[in-house]
Every structure is written in C-alpha cells, then in structure tokens.
Image (cartoon, helix red, strand yellow):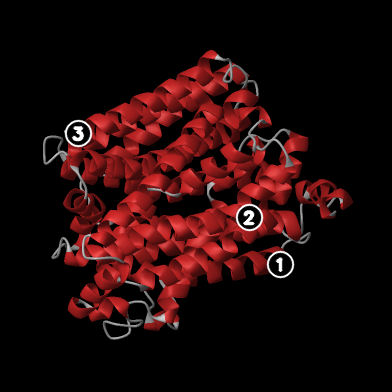
Amino acid sequence: MVAVIIITGLCLVSVYISYIAFRKGFTKSADDYFVAGSSLGYFVLIFSLMASFLSAFSMFGMSSFGYRLGFGSLYVLTANLVPLGFLWYFMHKKTFLLGRARKWMSMGAPFGERYGTATRIILVLVVLVASIPYLVAQIQGIGVMLEAMSEGIISFHMGLFFVPFFIALYLMMGGMKGAAWVNAIQGVFFSIMVFVLFFFVMMKNGGFVPTMEMVMAKHPTLFQIGWAGGKVWSYPMIFGMATAMCIGCVCFPQPYMHAYSSRSARGLKAMFLSFGGICLVVITLPTLIGIAGNVIIPGLKGVEADKIYGLVASATMPDWLAAFAVAGGFTAAMSTVNGLVFGNATNLSVDIIKTLRPETRPSELITIARVFVGIIMAICVFIAWNPNTPVAELSIIAFGTVAVTFFALWGAYYWKRATKTGAILSILVGVSLNVVFFFVGGKAMVLFPQKSFFQLNGFLASFILAGIVFFVGSYLTTPGKTEEKSLKLFFHPVLTK
C-alpha cells in the first residue's frame, strides 16, 4: 500500500501544478492553452520533451525487453537515439521558424499550408490511429505495475482507471504549460529513481560484473546476436526496430508541440540535440535491470515480464524506497500519456474542428480539446482492458505506423516537387500495409525480419513502399495552386541561414 500512497501523492501533486497554471491564467487564450504562449525555456523544454517520450516503454517495456531478449535491446537503443537529436533538429527547425511566424498550434498546420486541407485532416487521423497502441502500452503498463505493487489490492482493471483519471484532470486544467511543468518535474524524478534502482539491483549479487556473469551462466543466449535460429537480434531485426523508433519519434505530436512552445531557437536546438544522449543513458539502465532480473525473479513469460521492473524493486530495496522507484516508472508513463493525449486532442480541435468550422471561437476550441482528452483516454482504457501484447512491442508498432508520415513532412520542408497526391497516397499506403501485415501475420510480421520481404520486417517494407509511392506519385502529378503558393513560404531564403 506504500506504493499506492506514493503514486497517489504524485498524481495529486501533478494536478496541483496544473491547477497553478490554470489559476495564473496560462490557459485563457488558445495560444496559451495549446502552445504555452511560446514561452518555455531550456530546462522545461529539455526535460518535458524527454519525459513525453521516456514512457512505460522506456521503464517497464525496455526492462521487459532486456529480461526476455537480452543485450540486443541495447543495440536498438544506440542505433535509434544517437542520430535522433540531429534528425529532429534537421526536420523541425522549420517547424519552429514557420510556426512562430504563422502562429501554428498543431502538427497538421504545416501539412495544411503546404498540401491543403485534405492532407491536413488525413495526417491528423493517421497520427491518432498510430498513437493509440503507444497510449495503450502506457496505460497497460500502469495497470500491470499497480496490481503488482499493491499485491492485488488494486486490480489491473481498476489500475486502468486510477492514474489516467488524474492525467485527464491535469491536462484539462493546465494546457501545454501545465503539462510541460508536470513533465519536467516527472522527468527529473524518474531519472533519479532509475539510477537508484540500478544500484540496488546490481548490488544484490555483488555488483554489475558478478550479476551479468550469473545471468550469462544461466541464459547465455541473452548475450548473443542472432539467437533462436537467427531470428532474435539479427542485424535486420535491430535495424528495423531502431529505424521505426527513430523516424517514428520525429513524426509524433510531441516534437511539433515543443517546437511551437519554445521561447527561442537556441532552446529548440539544445532540446533536440541533448535528447539522444540523456535518453541513451536513462533507458539503458532499465534494460540492464531487466537482464539482471533473470537471476532475481526467474521464469516470467510474455506480458508477465512487464512486471519485472517493480518486482526487482521489491526484491532488492526497502518497501518505501521500492515504492518510490516504481513511482518513477509510473511518472514516465504518465508524462508520455500526458504529451501524446494532449497533442492529439490539440490536432483534433485545431486541424479538424477549426478547419471544418472556421467560425469556432478560441474559447470553444479549448473546451473541445478538453472533451477530446477525455474521449481519447476512455478509448485507450477500453482497448487496454484485455492485454495480450507486451508494452515494448505495442510501442514499436506505434512508432512504425506513424513513421510513414515522414516522407510527407520531409517533402513539405525540403522538396519543391512534392505534391498533395504523393503525400496522401504515401501516408495511406504505408498505414494500410502496416495494418494488413499486422492482421495477416500478427506482431511478428511487423516487428521481425521476413524472408518474403528480403529479411526486412513489415514496418520497413511498408516504409520503403510508402517512400516509393510518395516520389512516384509526386512525379506523376502536377502541383496544385496550394503547393505552388506554399513554395514562397516553405523555401524562403531566410530559412536556409
């Protein structure tokens, strides 16, 4: 019950912080509510963005990955996070510059101005669909860990409602500024606690090296590349998963929202370029904790392995400290739900409702966004009710699905010949193929290399085909008036300085 009390306390603190933002008037205008009045400084930007991505996937999912699949998980992290900050800055520098000039508040805005209304709406709906598995992964992780740490006092299904209720409450009140403040504080908290847990887990068996030697003696395959007949952590598998995560991170709502909310270009650059290094350290630790968990809590399979983070905390730390360690994992999940739900609610309000009903007033947009927060949260709780896919796999499926929007984004900013038809077709083809592959071959076809795809996984096959469709579709179609008119803005000489 100590863990439940601490987690409840953290939820209440988060609500109070958001309430302060509400009382101080940071949600009165649409600009304040959706993009924090473009006022966020270095510290809040860096830790808010970090917290919005370091999720239940990073804490519970990666520890589960390490527990089940071993050191190969670290190769995925390295191949994903090292280039990510540079790719983010390359892709979203124009998001910041144009967003500030054009008063953008949603991720559909650049697509709308570059390609037209149809692309803007399709993009937003696709991102929402892709976000659902990632949100479900966070909520599922919250429910699993609450049940484990409360020793069944709070059931999995009750846990699905517990934390999401608080998240919805503080999102509705505080808007982007309240969410960013909460994210930053949660980011600092869970970063500290994962270091503390790592120390206790490794000291359980005499230190890092003795612990890894014990794991290797019992589970040598966890330290191999290409085990299980070459299926697990083959180089195509590592490349496929890392690519999905890296490109998917660029295409989710969080970098758009933080780019719009940044106070300065320097803050934006610091935020993006520091992200990869900080996250590489923070996410590596849960992975190693999961690997070490094989000699502390052996025998977990499938979804049950998502509990390893909390179980090793209980096995190696005093109850009160274990509760704080697990609460750190909860805050990671909360902050990601926070950022992703708010981003999608903003998109639905501004890109769809405002586009279809231009007369909608700013105050009405804020109210509509708050309603969408509740609706999205309810849908995700419903889907998470009967879990059958581990948190890590759910998250990678989400990254892979949203990544197919990458070509439309790149074309908007860096290719004058890009057309609306090419952008729309590439998005629809990429998403459709991901869905088809998932329903035909399950998560294995999406995540793992397939002989029929020349050792690519389903995501990479979908991504490559989406790219081909984008370029061919753009070459075969003539840019319309919207595309032609947008060139002066999107390729203005000042943007290349």
335 to 83, vertically: above or below: above
Query: Which mark lies nearer to you, 2 or 3?
Result: 3
Dot 1 falls on a residue whose secondary structure is helix
Dot 3 falls on a residue whose secondary structure is helix
Determine the residue positioned at 56% across, 53% down: 275
Spot occupied by residue 384 in the image (x, y as percentages of width and height): 27, 44
> Could you tell which of marks 3 and 1 lies nearer the N-terminus?
3
Could you tell me if residue 169 is visible in this image? no
Quadrant the N terminus occupies: top left
115 to 245, vertically: above or below: above
Q: Amino acid at mark 3?
A: Val
Spot occupied by residue 419 in the image (x, y as percentages of width and height): 71, 57
Residue 200 or residue 279, whichever sits in front:
200
> Could you tell which of marks 2 and 3 lies nearer the N-terminus?
3
Q: Quadrant of residue 36?
A: top right
Q: Amino acid at mark 2?
A: Leu
Q: Amino acid at mark 1?
A: Leu
Q: Residue furthest left?
A: 152
> 396 left or right of 413?
left
Query: What's the CA distance linking mark 2 and mark 1?
Result: 37 Å
**Residue placed under numbered mark 2 in the picture:** 273
Dot 2 falls on a residue whose secondary structure is helix
**Residue placed under numbered mark 3 in the picture:** 2
Query: What's the CA distance linking mark 3 and mark 1?
Result: 63 Å
Could you tell me if residue 415 is visible in this image? yes
Spot occupied by residue 159 in the image (x, y as percentages of width and height): 22, 36
Q: Residues within 10 Å of mark 1 (few under 14, many from 20)?
A: few
Determine the residue positioned at 64% across, 26% down: 31
**Residue placed under numbered mark 1 in the picture:** 476
Quadrant the C terminus occupies: bottom right
Q: Residues within 10 Å of mark 3 (few under 14, many from 20)?
A: some
